[in-house]
Image (cartoon, helix red, strand yellow):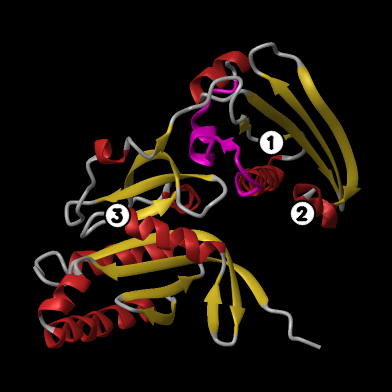
Amino acid sequence: MPKTPKRKSAAVMFTDIAGYTEAMSKSEQKALEMLRRKRKIIRPLIDEHKGVYVKEIGDGTLSYFESGYDASKCAVQLQKGLKDDTELNLRVGIHIGDIIFEDEDVYGEGVNVASRLESMAPVGGVFVSNHVYDELINKEDFEGVSLGLQSLKGLGRLIEVYALVDEDLIAPNPTDYKESQVQVHSDDEVPSIAILMMENRGVQDDDFWSMGLTEDLIIKVAGAGLIRVAPMREILEIDIKNSIKEIAMKLQVKYILTSSLFKKDNNFDLRCQLLEAKSGVSKFGHKWSEPLDNAQTIVDN
């Protein structure tokens, strides 16, 4: 029986050397020296940040990390170290997604998206997906600028792309990315949704449950297909005292999902309601009463 490939979610980092093909055409020896120098610099950095170096693909490298934070720290340190290097011009892309392990190789959507982000990045820059940036929002080490929703080649959904900004990083010109940016849809186009923070109706200590389930749900829905989902960082900035219509207008979405959680002992009650913001009409409502162990199953379904 064939062995089932192993899957996991990880932060994938893809790098390449800009202008490598041209350098190779001028001097193979010089181009190969660039590869050796890149190898010597990047491998210790990946180890230092608890990453796994997978392979070289031409002048590119593929690696993965346990968190988007670790991957981003590694990428920024890499680019800072090369700031004054006029020959080794790197671009970096990072995405959190599923990867598949098979015969010591790694592939999957996480790899594909990271590769697309890297190809969009400027020399000396680091591009990350919204999945990664959501991990970095509350970290003082990072700042980023949104380049909007982008349609990446070969991917069946939209990705919000961020450029990490730092005095030692090359920041992109946002207008260079307007052509591929997907504008916020009209009512008749691709649907959009904001999943508001789940209200905890139990004791204060259970706030982490409502926070965790909300974030899991946002990630799950965002990864499901062609639907624009307001990211977690924007949800955290919302004033819940505002009306549904005001919230929808601020987040530029058509639908709002509200929910509540009441946890007692090893059981919970979960209620949710899907509202069309423009009309205020409830399109869907449901209640689950389940053992606590089934919480993730509810999110998945």
Q: Where is residue 177 in the image (x, y as percent from the top left)?
A: 31, 40
Reading the image, the residue beneath label 1 is 198
- Mark 3 closeness class: few <14, some 14–19, many ≥20 residues within 10 Å: many
Precedes in sequence: disc 3 or disc 1: 3
Front-lying residue, 262 or 194: 194
Q: Which residue is under mark 2? A: 296
Q: For the view shown, which residue lies furthest in the front direction?
A: 25
The residue sitting at 54% across, 35% down in the picture is 230
Comparing marks 3 and 2, which lies closer to the viewer?
3
* Residue type indicated by callout 3: Ala
Tell me: 268 left or right of 7: right
Secondary structure found at label 2 = helix
Which amino acid, by three-letter code, is at mark 2?
Gln
Residue 171 seen in the current view: yes
Q: Nearer the viewer, residue 195 or 27?
A: 27
Q: Which quarter of the picture shows residue 199?
A: top right
Within-10-Å neighbours for mark 1: few <14, some 14–19, many 20+: many
Q: Give the range drawn in magenta.
A: 222-240
Quadrant showing the N terminus:
bottom right
Q: Mark 3 points at which residue?
A: 121
Callouts 2 and 1 close, C-beta under 8 Å: no
Q: Which amino acid is tagged 1?
A: Met
Q: For this view, does 151 lie left or right of residue 294?
A: left
Query: Farthest residue toward the top?
Result: 279
Name which residue lies at 75% across and 15% down: 281
Vertical placement of 210 versus 6: above or below?
Answer: above
Label 2, label 1: how many angstroms apart (C-alpha)? 14 Å
Is residue 243 visible in the rendered image? The answer is: no
Q: Write the residue at 57% across / 21% down.
A: 248
